[in-house]
Image (cartoon, rainbow, N blue to C red):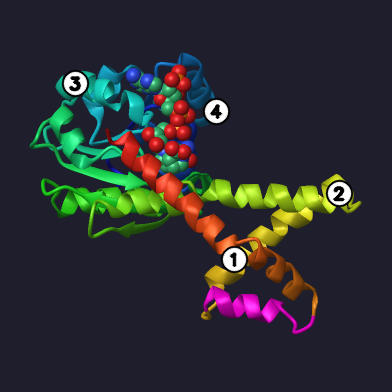
Amino acid sequence: MNNRQIAFIGAGNMANSLIRGLLAKDVAASHIHASDIDSDKLQSLQTECGIQTGDTAAVAAVADVIILAVKPQVMAQVCAALKPLIAKPDCLVISIAAGIPVASLAQWLGEERAIVRCMPNTPSLVGAGATGLYANANCNDDHKTLAGAIMSAVGIACWLQAEKDIDTVTALSGSGPAYYFLMIEAMEKAAVAMGLAPDVARQLSIQTALGAGKLAAASDVAPDELRRRVTSPGGTTEQALLSFANQGFESTVANAMLAAQHRAAELAK
Ligand SMILES: NC(=O)C1=CN([C@@H]2O[C@H](COP(=O)(O)OP(=O)(O)OC[C@H]3O[C@@H](n4cnc5c(N)ncnc54)[C@H](OP(=O)(O)O)[C@@H]3O)[C@@H](O)[C@H]2O)C=CC1
Ligand SMILES: O=C(O)[C@@H]1CCC=N1
């Protein structure tokens, strides 16, 4: 990966997480390029990160891999403009857009193009990303290694057997950070309502999420056993979990994820 030129089309929230995450993993700023219709975003990236910025033509001219990081709604027009500008015949295109199928990308970019569709998430910024990837038949081992290396540099990367699994990954780990942030917010608010100082409530809420995640990742036992180890019989956690269960916690989560997955399918149209 380190001798490849990586170009981002779209320099918004997700591209920023990936770019800054890659820089933190010692990918050279001279190897990262970005283009966006918003020149302020490019200026910030150039000033703060020292990466290369330019218009679509400039970044497409040098790219070994192009990461499409624009909203799904503008993907067709972005690809149509990009297609004649890709200079290197073997250039890999990676789309991170929710919903947009490989078949549509191939239709817009050319049926011969090597394309990886993936779903990263914003914790890539701190090296704790989670990405699901799917490659089209035009991708050779080198393309797959390159896509996997980029996403593995900023977290974990899982190859998927079926493209439809990307929509599930979107509902799970793509959107998932927002679910945990909501939980952090809700716990903080509840603690403040109980009288805790806001700064203490925030610190403890965030640290609890971090601690639970780190412990789950480091443990050789499943999350349900870790949950049991917190839940003293007849104790406080038991009452909290009972309250969650009585209010349909699991179906609330499942329905939320189905709504996200459904939206991904809608965005494909
Ligand atoms: N945010 C997330 O957590 C995740 C997002 N994604 C996917 O990443 C993609 C980007 O999402 P996100 O970063 O949140 O969105 P943002 O809106 O933050 O970023 C998209 C950027 O693309 C710019 N843009 C619009 N049109 C063009 C164009 N023609 N050429 C170049 N740049 C253009 C936008 O400018 P302007 O704002 O002026 O329109 C904006 O700066 C989406 O497809 C989303 O599905 C995937 C995983 C997680
Ligand atoms: O909300 C969205 O559509 C994007 C995709 C996954 C996370 N953010």
The furthest residue to the right: 195
Q: How far is the residue under mark 3 from the one under mark 1?
A: 44 Å
Instruction: Categorize mark 1 by other alpha carbons within 10 Å: few (<14), some (14-19), many (20+).
Output: few
Along the polypeptide, which appears first: circle 2 or circle 1? 2
Q: Are marks 4 and 3 in contact (CB under 8 Å)?
A: no
Residue occupying image coordinates x 19% and y 34%: 104
Which numbered disc flags the more N-terminal residue, 3 or 1? Answer: 3
Note whether ligand 1 is within 8 Å of mark 1.
no
Q: Dot 3 corresponds to which residue?
A: 85
Name which residue type carries label 1: Lys
- Mark closer to the observer (3, 1): 1
In which quadrant of this rendering is ligand 2 seen? top left
Choose the circle earlier in sequence order: 2 or 4.
Answer: 4
Disc number placed over residue 159 in the picture, else none: none
Indicate if the residue with disc 4 has its beta carbon within 8 Å of ligand 1. Answer: no
| SS at badge 3 | helix
Query: As shown in the figure, which amino acid type bears the numbered disc 3?
Result: Leu
Q: Answer with left or right where residue 169 lies relative to residue 103.
A: right
- Disc 2 marks a residue whose amino acid type is Ala
The residue singled out by tag 1 in the image is 214
Q: CA distance from mark 4 to mark 1?
A: 30 Å
From which residue to which does the magenta span run? 222-234
Give me the residue at 78% from left, 47% from top. 189
Residue to which mark 4 is pinned: 48
Return the x and y of residue 261 as percentages of the image width and height.
39, 47
Compared with 172, 268 (above or below) is above
Q: Residue 186's x, y, as percent?
A: 71, 49
Q: Nearer the viewer, residue 236 or 89?
A: 236
- The prevailing secondary structure element of the residues shown in magenta is helix
Name the mark on residue 193.
2
> What's the CA distance linking mark 2 and mark 3?
56 Å
